[in-house]
Amino acid sequence: MNQFFGKFNNFFSNFEALGSLFFRLIIGIAFIIYGLGKFPLPPEGLIDNFGLSPFVASLVAISEVSTGIVLIIAHFIKNPLGQTLTRLAGLNIVVLMICIFIVAHRDWFITKQLFTSIQTFLLIGGFYFLVKGNKI
């Protein structure tokens, strides 16, 4: 019986890198799409709806797009630079998502919207890459 479970676990451990890559791609693409949705700069929606300055609103849009790109590209850099870029992208995601919760969704705290939103998924993904880096 232990032999069966050993083979079963070994079989699926081969897919760990693939699962991490898919997770990275989904989060990276989501950030790119959200960021591009704020173009052209400065994003009037962020300025009008949340009272951000044109500089900060533009910084948010550029940060989202660049974070998504860096997160995806860092997967293919198999050295300490890739590890650092992944963790920096994860940190930026965490900071962005916490700011988004504070500015745009403060009424979501411990509600159904919090636990069913893509923002929570992105925040958890940011924590994942901040902690894990490029390790498989």
Image: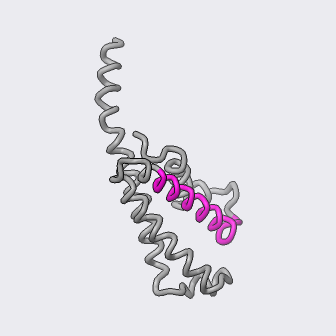
Q: Main secondary structure of the magenta part?
A: helix
Q: Quadrant of residue 26?
A: bottom left
Foreground pick, 113 / 93: 93
> Picture coordinates of residue 121 (x, y %)?
52, 55
Q: Residue furthest front?
A: 80
- Find residue 73 and report its horizontal and vertical position in percent: 36, 59
Q: Is residue 95 above or below residue 82?
A: below
Residue beneath the point at 37% across and 57% down: 25
Residue 40, compared with residue 86, is above or below; it is: below
What residue is drawn where x is 49% and y is 80%?
Answer: 38
Q: Is residue 106 magenta?
A: yes
Q: Residue furthest top?
A: 1
**Quadrant in which the C terminus is drawn:** top left
| x and y, in percent, of residue 21 in the image | 36, 49
Q: How is the image coloured?
A: one colour
Q: Horizontally, is 104 left or right of 71 in the view? A: right
Q: How many marks?
A: 0
- Residue 124 among magenta residues: no
Quadrant of image for the N terminus: top left
Q: Position of residue 54 (x, y in %)?
A: 60, 86
Write the start and end of the magenta stretch as one range: 84-107
Vertical side of 105 occupied by 8: above or below: above
Horizontal side, residue 122 vs residue 5: left or right: right
Which residue is painted at 50% across and 86% down in the image?
41
Q: Which residue corresponds to the image point at 31% horizontal and 24% vertical from the top-left?
A: 8
